[in-house]
Structure formats: C-alpha cells, structure tokens
Amino acid sequence: MTLPMKTLLLLLVCCCNPASCCPVLCKCYISPRNTQVVCNNVPLTHFPEDIPSNTSSLTIQYTNLSAISEQQLSATPLLQELHLFNNNLSSLPADLFRGVPRLFSVALSDNQLDLLPANVFGHAPLRNLILKNNLISRVDADWFTGHSNITWLDLSGNRLTTLPTALFQKLHHLENLDLSHNHLEKIVAGALDPLISLERLTLEGNKLSTLDPSTFSRNLKLTHLFLLENRLETLPPTLFHGLPNLLHLSLDDNRLRHITPGLLDQLQSIEDDGLDLTVNPWVCDKKVEYLWRWLQKNPKKAFLADDIKCSSPDSLKERSVMSLTGSELGL
C-alpha cells in the first residue's frame, strides 16, 4: 500500500520491521518525520515491548506501569518527549535517561515518586521537567550534573516544606517554576536569587505567612507571580521593587487586612485585570486609605475590583472598598 508522504499511518498490530512495529494495546502514529506511540488507559503492568526504534514521542498514561529501566528506554534512542502520567511509578533508576541523548521533555505527573537518585536527570538535555502530584518531600541538587538547561520545572502538588535552594544554583535558564500546593511556610532570603531568567513563579496554595523584602529582588524578568491561597497578613513595602516586567500578580485568598503605603506604586507594568486582591479580610478604617486611593486611580488594573470588599467594621461589611467615601473612612 502506497501512502502520501504526509499521511499518518495508524498501526494497531505489530509489523515485521522493528522501526514500524507497534506494541499491543497501544497506538502508533507514523509519519516521515517522527513516530508517536500512545498507550492510554489500557491494562499495562509492564513497559510495552516492540516500541518502534525511531519513536520520538512516547506516552504511557492511566496504566498500572510500576517500573521502567534504562535498557527499555534506550531502545528508542531518538526519543524527544516522554509522558508517563497517572501510573504507579514509585522510583526511577539513576541511569534511566542515559540512552536517550535527544530527550528534552519529561512528564511524570500523578505517580508515587518520592526520593529520586543522584544524577537521575543529568544524562539528557532536558528543558521541561514535570513532576506534578507525586510524593516528593525533598529535592536534591545532585539530580543534575553541573548547570542544567531546564526552562520549565513543575513540582506542584508534592510535599515540599522548604525550597530546593541548592538546586536553584544549577537552574540559571529556568523560566517557569511551579511550586503550588506544597507545604512551604517560608522562603529564605536569597533563595530565588539564582533564578535570573525566571518569568513565571507559582506559589499558590502553600502556607506562607510572611515574605522577606528581598525575596524577588533578583528575578528581574518576572512577568507572572501567583501568591494566592497562602496565609499572608502583611507585605513589605519594597517587596515588588525592581520588577519592571510584572504583568500579573495574584494575592487573592490570603489574610491581608491592609496594604502598606507605596507597595502598589511599584507595579508600573501590571496589565488590566492583572492584580487580584479579592477574598481578603480588608479592614476598612483609616489604614485602608492607600488601597482605596489606588483603586480609585487604577480601577482597570484590579481584577473584579468591586469584589474587593470590607470584612470590618460591621457598618461597612461586604461593601466594595472602591465604593467607599472619605467620610466613611474617617478621612
């Protein structure tokens, strides 16, 4: 059967040619440029056999896969993307990626991974590493050798209580860092300083109650900062100083009662609807004057500005801060 060069051939059974065989229970999409193998929601308990040797993208998700070896993976030396979502992996061998020198993206979300061996990610030129929703409580710097080319690191939904500061020393190219929904209570001053290329930082859903004034002072390229669903009560007046590119800032669902005068004046680049201050217990007394005046001056900058509401005193409860009058604030 002759097919046009751009036609994808779906193979459901194994062929005689090792470069075009397809594992039982999986689907293979073969084109002149690449081969994609997808094993989705099937009763796999072991790594599938007969994966085409020229596979560039491999997806095994929603299976009972519990182990994978360097020998199995090295049978696909052209592999560039590996997606192993929602399986039962609890560990990875240290040399797992030794035989896949072109691998740039690894996604291991929703497994049972905890402690990982030294140099586990050091054998491949990874740029994207997704470890979301595992059981990781400690991140070690020796996961990588030397400086890494990682630009996107997702550690959300794990059990981290402290930031992996030693690891950050190796991630000078990191642009997107997701640490949401862990158990972080504190960010040590200087911890984020090595991340000079960072553009997007997600700290949503942790237990942060305070932030050092210099927390983000070296992250000059930061454009999106997500601090929602923490326990922040006050913010240092110079916290956002030196962030000239910040477009979006989420501070919703914290414990903020007042905004320190001058804090929001630093947000010169915030886009329309880019600042979220909703779901905070704002106390509408004289100390709310700064926030009130800023909202009056920048009504389009705040997301759902009318939903930034007073929690006290009782006479102003549920009133929009922006709707208040000077006399109501005792000014």
Image: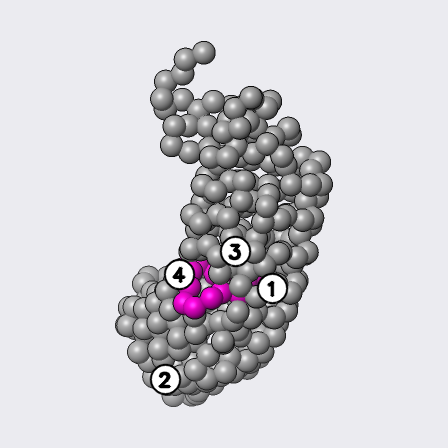
Q: Nearer the viewer, mark 4 or mark 2?
A: 4
Q: Which residue is mark 2?
A: 238
Label 2 neighbourhood size at 10 Å, few (<14), some (14-19), many (20+)? some
What number is the disc on residue 53?
Answer: none
Q: CA distance from mark 3 to mark 2?
A: 32 Å
Q: Does residue 321 appear left or right of residue 26 in this picture?
A: left
- Looking at the rendered structure, the kind of residue marked 4 is Asn
Q: Nearer the viewer, mark 2 or mark 1?
A: 1
Whether the magenta-drawn stretch holds residue 158 is answered as no
Q: Which residue is mark 1?
A: 117
Label 3 neighbourhood size at 10 Å, few (<14), some (14-19), many (20+)? many
Q: Name the residue: 38% across, 69% down.
A: 172
- Looking at the rendered structure, the kind of residue marked 1 is Pro
The magenta segment: 143-156
Label 4 neighbourhood size at 10 Å, few (<14), some (14-19), many (20+)? some
- Looking at the rendered structure, the kind of residue marked 3 is Ile
What is the x, y in percent for residue 195? 39, 71
Q: Which residue is mark 4?
A: 149
Q: Name the residue: 28% across, 72% down.
A: 244
Which of the two discs, 3 and 2, labels the residue nearer the N terminus?
Answer: 3
Which of the two discs, 1 and 4, labels the residue nearer the N terminus?
Answer: 1
Q: Could you tell me which secondary element the residue under label 3 belongs to?
A: strand
Above or below, comparing residue 15 to residue 93 in the picture: above
Q: Which residue is mark 3?
A: 130
Q: Name the residue: 51% across, 79% down.
A: 187
Q: Nearer the viewer, mark 1 or mark 4?
A: 1
Q: CA distance from mark 1 to mark 4?
A: 19 Å
Figure quadrant of residue 208 = bottom right
Which of the two discs, 3 and 4, labels the residue nearer the N terminus?
Answer: 3
Which of the two discs, 2 and 1, labels the residue nearer the N terminus?
Answer: 1
Q: CA distance from mark 1 to mark 3?
A: 16 Å
